[in-house]
Amino acid sequence: MKVSIFGSSGFVGEYIVNELIKNNFKPYALIRYGSDSKIKNKQGIKIITGNLDNSTAIEQTIMNTEAVIYNVGIIREFKSEGITFEKLHFNYFKQVVDIAKKLNVNRFILMSANGVKENGTGYQTTKYKAEEYLKNSGLKWTIFRPSLIFGNSTDKQEFCKQLKKDMISLPFPAPLFYSGLFPTKAGSFEMSPIHVKDVSKIFVKALSIKDTIGSTYELGGKNKSWKEIVSLISLACGKNKFFVPAPVWPIKMFASILDRFRFFPISKDQLIMLLEGNVCDSEEIFKLFRIDVPIDFNLESLSYLSKENE
């Protein structure tokens, strides 16, 4: 099967492409001008050079394929640079869906996110809009909503490596964020980390499982608190980090002013979503996709954070 994929050069996209090739699928990938070097495995992949604002490039990517995977996403927007949630999560996505319909490529898989909602942050709302547009498109769709995705990202952006850079490596205690006035539940909000290898396997297996058509799946591993996550990342980096309760309101205040600049490590929206938590139960989903032993979030699976692997 030939599969067109949008968002192939990023952290998760690279794993999905490799999994497609491993299972004898032929990926057709739209790659931005100047980003060819981000594709490590060029054997077995058809590269179309162009941007998502170019309908001709999108058509060239989708034509002659039998399925589409849309894996484009950002966790922060920089409006002054034209990088916005609305553009990447919805406007470009809508165009890809419309062209897939025009070319009669009916199978469509969307990478969404756990916790999306109609009235949320810009990230959550635009992901929700994309889901709704796909559900009403008439295509044979499947939507995946992963929680925190982790794994070795080599030179690409990934949550744990970013946390190592912005928090663990600094000579300060790690913050246990909390809302309100009292730190009684500081750092207790939870996420369900899932390994990128399991995510990519599920995406590719969905192409061959008809029962996944018209379904939305939340993907996550075992629930872990923010404190547990930061502790494990610290130990994997060879550090024993101290913690300090941190009220989130002053950080939100600074973020609302400074998060438009890349040097500021976190956005206001990211803080809001972080404290909401991000958990799900995927035990039955792993059975459906025959993931017998999901990769746990532990020191072994986080070994890529050690100095030897930098």
Image (cartoon, rainbow, N blue to C red):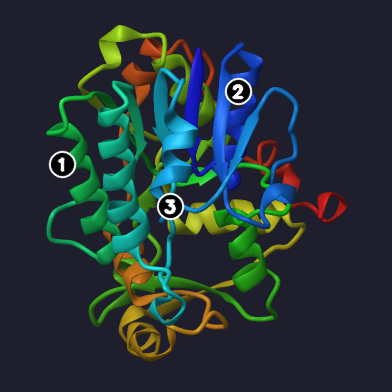
Say which residue appears at 31% left-offset and 36% top-offset. Answer: 99
Placement of 244 over or under 20, stated as above or below: below
Confirm whether residue 114 shows in the render. no
The residue carrying pointer 2 sits among few (fewer than 14), some (14 to 19) or many (20 or more) residues within 10 Å by Cα, namely many
Residue drawn at point x = 44 percent, y = 26 percent: 63
Q: Residues within 10 Å of mark 3 (few under 14, many from 20)?
A: few
**Alpha carbon separation for disc pair 1 and 3:** 23 Å
Residue labelled with disc 1 = 132
Q: Mark 1 near mark 3, Cβ–Cβ under 8 Å?
A: no
Q: Quadrant of residue 150?
A: top right
Q: Mark 2 is on which residue type?
A: Glu
In the rendered structure, which amino acid carries the disc numbered 3?
A: Asn
Residue 248 appearing in the image: yes
Where disc 2 sits, the SS reads helix
Q: From the top left corner, tell me how far across and down residue 205 is, in percent.
A: 46, 15
Task: Identify which amino acid the numbered label 1 is placed on.
Answer: Glu
On the picture, is 158 further left or further right than 183? right
Circles 2, 1 touching at the beta carbon (< 8 Å): no
Give coordinates of residue 14: x percent, y percent: 62, 38
Which of the two labelled residues, at mark 1 and mark 3, occupies the earlier sequence position?
3
Q: Position of residue 177 (x, y in %)?
A: 39, 72
Mark 3 or 2 closer to N-term?
Answer: 2
Q: Position of residue 139 (x, y in %)?
A: 22, 24
Query: In this rendering, would 29 be left or right of 191?
Result: right
Residue behind mark 3: 54
Q: Give the residue displayed 16% in from the left and 32% down from the top.
A: 137
Question: Element under label 1?
Answer: helix
In terms of depth relative to the viewer, which is nearer, 285 or 143?
Answer: 143
Task: Give the spatial CA distance, label 3 vs label 2.
Answer: 27 Å
Query: Residue 19 got which mark?
Result: 2
State the residue in front, 292 or 34. Answer: 34
Marking on residue 177: none
